[in-house]
């Protein structure tokens, strides 16, 4: 780790101003950033800690949506009665992230802003067609995830909350990479007002929607329908833990399991 | 057992050391603090293979807080790190033993090879300075795979090792093997890779080195399994210092698994530098540093063939192995794939002829040395995979093919240089099958099939040679050290006993087990026994802990010292009781005149020894303090059968270990709870190797791809079933405890049991082979290949 300053602000606006002023980085739960800093892979001169900002916290039901503050910890989402009642798949997804320590520190906003290709939350946000609110604007999930560790967020733009429309039903199935237990492939399947959505994490450079699965499941929402879909391996990740072909194979298998879990 | 071996021996006494470990009161090397200490950071090679054309450290030298920067050329008078075992090749020549510089000289040979040592007031300052050092690397092609390294045209790693060959060595009667193969009814063959492993003790390696100008002496706190060996190698071979001027202390150590046996560059350079800087120096590896600097384990590529007759009787075994020893020879690297490997290829079977040829090869990887089991897991994996294949080929049940070949007459001289003293392989097989409910397996398999899952059952009947080792045999085989152990028993005036052992506990529970032996033998309370280990300033010269040797060898040394204590105690008691020495009996903590009720308690005798007012001073020295060195007459041979049951999801390739049953024969057991814990830990590591752990280098760049716990999968609790373990006892015939050793059995027995179970499960879908680790990806690939009729490359 290199030396760095840590600053706190008393509002999101003040935090954004501090980041602009110092050229620093926002610190959410720190579960990726601090680890990278310890390895000297990240070298922010200043961290602006978002932890005390109450406007970034909390879980509430707002009509047909569940609104979760950006600094809400995974453990809070996993345990929240509102989440379990409205979108149990989202609570289960949060419960399956990392380990207890990670879940007690890691945050929804931090995970989305980092957009790790194997993170779970991006699959939930994209799969549910959520809306990401920032200190500047609102961004539809379909427009938010841009590529490997890349999002639509501009410099100094901070996620404030995420609004998840409550689906008819949804399920997330993660096949864990054996070492990191991140998603080797994770598939989020949701039946929503806007139709069937299938989001895939772990398999590509960034979370993506599997249109072929969505189309098949829109026709027949059955496990067999999902399983019959063939996903091309082109463009998918290939590493120590699985080839692109293996990941391509797993996508419909896991989608089918998600559908089966909803039967 | 005799009447004087009562009390806590054989009881599951709670581990006395756990109080401090579990409450954070343990004192590990990195807990040691000294006044004026400075921090050390090692700049390591980012390249697998490169020439160093220059090192510019001018800017770094003047960076804030920097006290000194050393490179290989600065270590004048410092020799390379030695290898402790000389292997003589089939050509009659000694192995190629290239220099292993403490800090790189002119060339780096693996990612992580230390290039410079930075000493600074703080760790951050040392790291900052390291970034200012400019090393001019001329990158060379790298080779990381042992088989690749032997090919013509492979990058040449050492001038002293043409063709990257360290040695080609063989054991066994080749002629007899060839003759047996010529008349064989059938030959079963396997091609196997024993995957490279990264040890990952929970405590990374660390050192604190200091120099005293007062008496020109050095003190080194270090994470070591064998402080005396560390000191001997460092002083006599590398630094040229008198042993008397170096004290090595291995305090609480958080796991070793072999990786802390060796003399490493870091602490050696630090001892040297502590005088030059004249400050205490401290260093602790970070986990990512451990991955590229701790000796790795295994990494064999093997072809094995078993010749059998029509009844499934083994006629001969032929084994050819390429062993990747990494970039340099680590301390015991040369003996692992030879002496500790080929000698175990008989397994539990009366195979009349065995021949094994091993080629050890240098590559651009971290050095490979002993890792829990050390050679014996490799041998067991070969034997049990090929035995499984014989069963498959001949249509024999897996227990039956083993029973047809078990050794049943002891002592048994194998064709690969060992003599097994005792064992009962049917007993452990029978009990393992009972624990595993083999009879109920067909029903479980059918039930799994209804759920679309594949079930398999795999056997492993392993043997290991522990209790290292008879020094004369080891010496004849090339060992450059003895392999005895020392124990000192100091009875204090008030009757408390301090035991000084050359064994070193880094998780094994010696402070409890050894205290049980002493308390049991002396008939005193275990609470009055203190066990001291790990400090060359306090203990007699000991060889340390590895190879499941501590109880069989270290424990026996203590027993020998206890015998001397009792013998002297009898003399003192005879005087006090005014009886003939020959009439004194010792039992239950009392010296008694035979046939009378006249006795002296152990404490009274101890007090008399130190307050010799009424004492035979003309015939006997005062005091009650005895030392014994014990050199075993044979190895010990723990053995057993492990049975693994897996369930495979053919859609994802995921293998779940649904049951694991192990029945082991460790000889007499002092503390069953500790033994069971050792078995559990060993099984976890064995299952880890077979299912999860995989050290992978990029074949072109030589970069370590599995360089952190994000990519190197260690087993976790939820990867493991609830183990069913049992023991059967045939006491070791040649040590007074009848003990054989238990530390490595799990890691030895588990891998083939698991892989054989996977093969048994996958046979249903046409898969004939799989390599470790049986990751979901690999299993899925094997299933796809079987479907398409192709075979999968390793």
Image (cartoon, coloured by chain):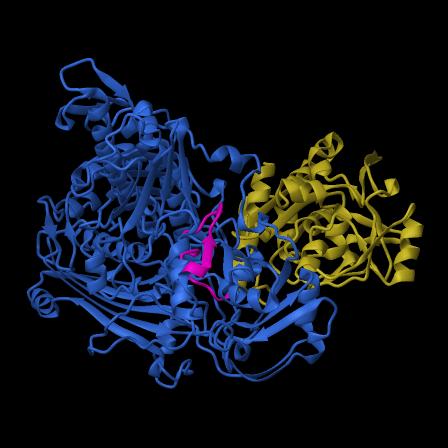
The N terminus of chain B - image quarter: top left
The C terminus of chain B is located in which quarter? bottom left
With A247 as the anchor, is B487 left or right in this view? Answer: left
Front position in the image: A183 or B554 = B554
Q: Read off the magenta span.
A: B244-265
Secondary structure that dominates the magenta span:
loop
Residue A45, position as x, y percentages in the image: 81, 62
Q: Residue at x 70, y 40 (%)?
A: A104
Q: Is residue B253 magenta?
A: yes
On screen, residue A70 above or below B291: above
As drawn, the chain in yellow is A
Q: Is residue A98 above or below residue A237?
A: above
Badge count: 0
Rendered blue, the chain in question is: B
Query: Could you say where residue B106 lies in the image, as x and y percent from the top left?
Result: 51, 83
Residue placed most toward the observer, B484 or B104? B484
- Foreground pick, B641 / B343: B343
């Amino acid at each position: 780790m290199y030396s760095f300053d840590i600053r706190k602000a008393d509002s999101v606006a003040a935090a954004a101003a501090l980041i602009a002023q110092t050229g620093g980085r926002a610190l959410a739960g720190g579960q990726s950033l601090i680890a990278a800093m310890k390895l000297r892979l990240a070298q922010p001169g200043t961290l602006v800690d978002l932890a005390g900002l109450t406007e970034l916290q909390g879980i509430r039901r707002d009509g047909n949506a569940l609104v979760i503050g950006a600094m809400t910890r995974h453990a809070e989402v996993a345990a929240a009665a509102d989440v379990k009642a409205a979108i149990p798949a989202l609570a289960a997804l949060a419960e399956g992230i990392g380990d207890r320590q990670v879940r007690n520190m890691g945050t929804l906003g931090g995970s989305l802003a980092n957009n790790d290709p194997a993170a779970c939350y991006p699959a939930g946000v994209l799969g549910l067609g959520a809306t990401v609110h920032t200190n500047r604007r609102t961004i539809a999930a379909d427009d938010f995830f841009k590529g490997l560790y890349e999002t639509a967020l501009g410099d100094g733009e901070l996620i404030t909350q995420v609004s998840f429309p409550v689906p008819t039903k949804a399920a997330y199935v993660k096949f864990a990479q054996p070492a990191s237990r991140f998603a080797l492939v994770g598939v989020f399947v949701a039946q929503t007002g806007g139709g069937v959505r299938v989001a895939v994490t772990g398999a590509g450079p960034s979370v993506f929607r599997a249109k072929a699965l969505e189309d098949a499941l829109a026709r027949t929402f059955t496990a067999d329908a999902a399983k019959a879909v063939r996903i091309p391996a082109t463009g998918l990740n290939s590493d120590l833990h699985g080839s692109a072909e293996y990941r391509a194979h797993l996508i419909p298998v896991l989608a089918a399991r998600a559908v089966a879990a909803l039967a | 057992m005799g009447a004087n071996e009562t009390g806590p021996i054989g009881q599951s006494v709670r581990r006395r050391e756990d109080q401090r470990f579990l409450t954070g009161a343990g004192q590990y090397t990195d807990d040691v603090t000294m006044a004026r200490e400075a921090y050390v950071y090692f700049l390591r090679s980012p390249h697998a293979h490169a020439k160093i054309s220059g090192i510019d450290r001018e800017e770094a030298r003047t960076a804030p807080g920097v006290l000194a920067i050393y490179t290989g050329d600065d270590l004048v008078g410092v020799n390379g790190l030695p290898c402790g075992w000389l292997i003589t090749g089939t050509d009659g020549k000694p192995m190629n033993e290239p220099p292993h510089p403490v800090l790189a000289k002119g060339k780096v040979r693996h990612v992580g090879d230390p290039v410079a040592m930075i000493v600074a007031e703080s760790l951050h300052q040392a790291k900052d300075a390291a970034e200012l050092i400019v090393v001019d690397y001329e990158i060379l092609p790298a080779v990381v795979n042992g088989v690749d390294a032997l090919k013509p045209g492979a990058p040449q790693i050492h001038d002293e090792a043409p063709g990257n060959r360290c040695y080609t060595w063989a054991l066994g009667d080749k002629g007899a093997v060839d003759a047996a193969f010529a008349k064989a009814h059938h030959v079963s063959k396997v091609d196997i890779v024993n995957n490279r492993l990264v040890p990952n003790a929970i405590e990374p390696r660390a050192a604190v080195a200091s120099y005293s100008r007062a008496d020109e002496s050095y003190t080194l706190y270090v994470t070591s399994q064998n402080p005396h060996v560390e000191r001997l190698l460092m002083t006599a071979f590398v630094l040229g210092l008198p042993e008397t001027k170096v004290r090595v202390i291995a305090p609480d150590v958080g796991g070793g698994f072999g990786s802390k046996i060796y003399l490493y560059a870091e602490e050696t350079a630090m001892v040297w530098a502590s005088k030059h800087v004249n400050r205490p120096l401290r260093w602790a590896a970070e986990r990512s540093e451990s991955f590229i600097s701790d000796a790795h384990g295994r990494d064999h590529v093997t072809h094995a063939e078993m010749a059998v007759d029509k009844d499934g009787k083994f006629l001969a075994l032929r084994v050819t192995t390429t062993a990747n020893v990494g970039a340099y020879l680590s301390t015991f690297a040369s003996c692992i794939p030879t002496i500790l490997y080929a000698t175990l290829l008989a397994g539990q079977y009366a195979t009349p002829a065995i021949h094994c040829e091993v080629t050890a090869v240098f590559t651009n990887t971290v050095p490979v040395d002993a890792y829990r089991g050390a050679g014996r897991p490799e041998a067991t994996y070969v034997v049990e995979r090929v035995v499984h294949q014989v069963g498959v080929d001949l249509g024999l049940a897996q227990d039956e093919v083993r029973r047809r070949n078990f050794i049943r007459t002891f002592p048994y001289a194998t064709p690969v240089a060992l003599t097994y003293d005792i064992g009962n392989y049917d007993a452990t097989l029978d009990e393992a099958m009972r624990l595993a409910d083999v009879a109920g397996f067909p029903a479980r398999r059918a039930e799994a099939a209804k759920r679309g899952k594949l079930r398999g059952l795999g056997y492993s009947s392993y043997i290991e040679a522990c209790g290292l080792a008879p020094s004369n045999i080891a010496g004849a085989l090339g060992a450059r050290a003895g392999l005895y152990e020392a124990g000192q028993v100091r009875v204090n005036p008030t009757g408390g006993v301090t035991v000084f052992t050359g064994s070193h506990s880094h998780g094994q529970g010696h402070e409890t087990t050894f205290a049980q032996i002493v308390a049991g033998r002396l008939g005193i309370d275990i609470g009055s026994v203190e066990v001291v280990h790990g400090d060359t300033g306090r203990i007699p010269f000991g060889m340390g802990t590895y190879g499941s040797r501590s109880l069989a060898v270290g424990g026996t040394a203590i027993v020998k010292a206890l015998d001397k204590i009792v013998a002297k105690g009898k003399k003192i008691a005879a005087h006090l009781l005014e009886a003939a020495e020959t009439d004194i009996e010792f039992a239950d903590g009392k010296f008694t005149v035979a046939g009378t009720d006249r006795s002296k308690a152990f404490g009274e005798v101890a007090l008399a020894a130190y307050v010799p007012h009424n004492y035979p001073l003309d015939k006997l020295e005062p005091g009650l303090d005895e030392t014994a060195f014990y050199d075993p007459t044979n190895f010990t041979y723990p053995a057993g059968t492990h049975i693994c049951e897996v369930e495979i999801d053919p859609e994802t390739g995921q293998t779940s270990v649904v049951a694991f049953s192990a029945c082991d024969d460790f000889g007499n057991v002092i503390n069953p709870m500790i033994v069971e814990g050792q078995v559990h830990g060993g099984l976890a590591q064995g299952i880890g190797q077979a299912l999860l752990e995989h050290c992978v280098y990029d074949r072109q760049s030589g970069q370590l791809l599995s360089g952190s716990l994000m990519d190197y999968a260690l087993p976790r609790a939820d990867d493991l079933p609830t183990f069913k373990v049992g023991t059967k006892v045939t006491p070791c015939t040649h040590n007074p405890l009848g003990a054989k050793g238990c530390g490595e059995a799990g890691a030895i027995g588990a891998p083939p049991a698991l892989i054989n179970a996977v093969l048994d499960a996958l046979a249903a879908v046409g898969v004939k082979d799989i390599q470790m680790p049986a990751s979901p990806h690999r299993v899925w690939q094997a299933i796809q290949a079987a479907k398409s009729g192709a075979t999968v490359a390793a």
